[in-house]
Image (tube, rainbow, N blue to C red):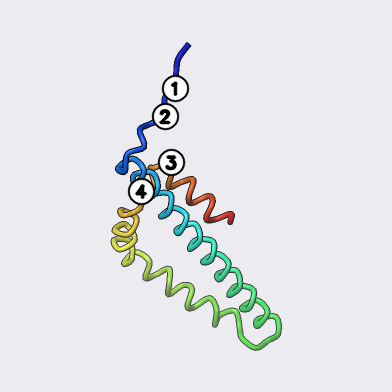
Amino acid sequence: MAIILPPEASTTFVVAVVVPLVIGFLVGIVVKTALKIGAAIAIIALLLIFAGIITPSQVIQPVLGLFKSGPALVPKVKEVAGFLPYSSITFLIGLAVGFYK
């Protein structure tokens, strides 16, 4: 029979577990909020198009401009992503809890 012992509750271990959990939770909240805002903007744009207030080209041109400037932002995104401990299971748990909370 194997006995599974809990890891020691040292300060280093607790910090190594809690910090990625909190960062994941905050990232989950930010992602969820960004998706909500994006959906709200898309719904408002569709309503304005259906009402005839704006044309589809007025919406498509800024979006295409954003996609054209995307490759210039790749190094900055990689730099920010380098700070996230996305390989940690506690980060992923925090991300899921922050996204669904």
Mark pair 2, 1: CA separation: 7 Å
Q: Is residue 24 above or below residue 45?
A: above
Q: Residue under label 2, please give it.
A: 6
Viewer-nearest of discs 4 and 1: 1
Mark pair 4, 1: CA separation: 26 Å
How far across and down, in percent of the image, does residue 86 sit? 39, 47
User: As rendered, which of 75 and 16 lies closer to the eye?
Assistant: 16
Q: Residue under label 3, please give it.
A: 89
Q: Residue at x 53, y 50 (%)?
A: 96
Q: Are marks 3 and 4 in contact (CB under 8 Å)?
A: no
Q: Is residue 86 above or below residue 42?
A: above
Mark pair 2, 4: CA separation: 23 Å
Q: Residue at x 37, y 70 (%)?
A: 69
Q: Amino acid at mark 1?
A: Ile
Residue at the farthest top position:
1
Of the 4 image quadrants, the one containing the C terminus is bottom right
Q: Is residue 70 above or below residue 53?
A: above
User: As rendered, which of 50 and 91 lies closer to the eye?
Assistant: 91
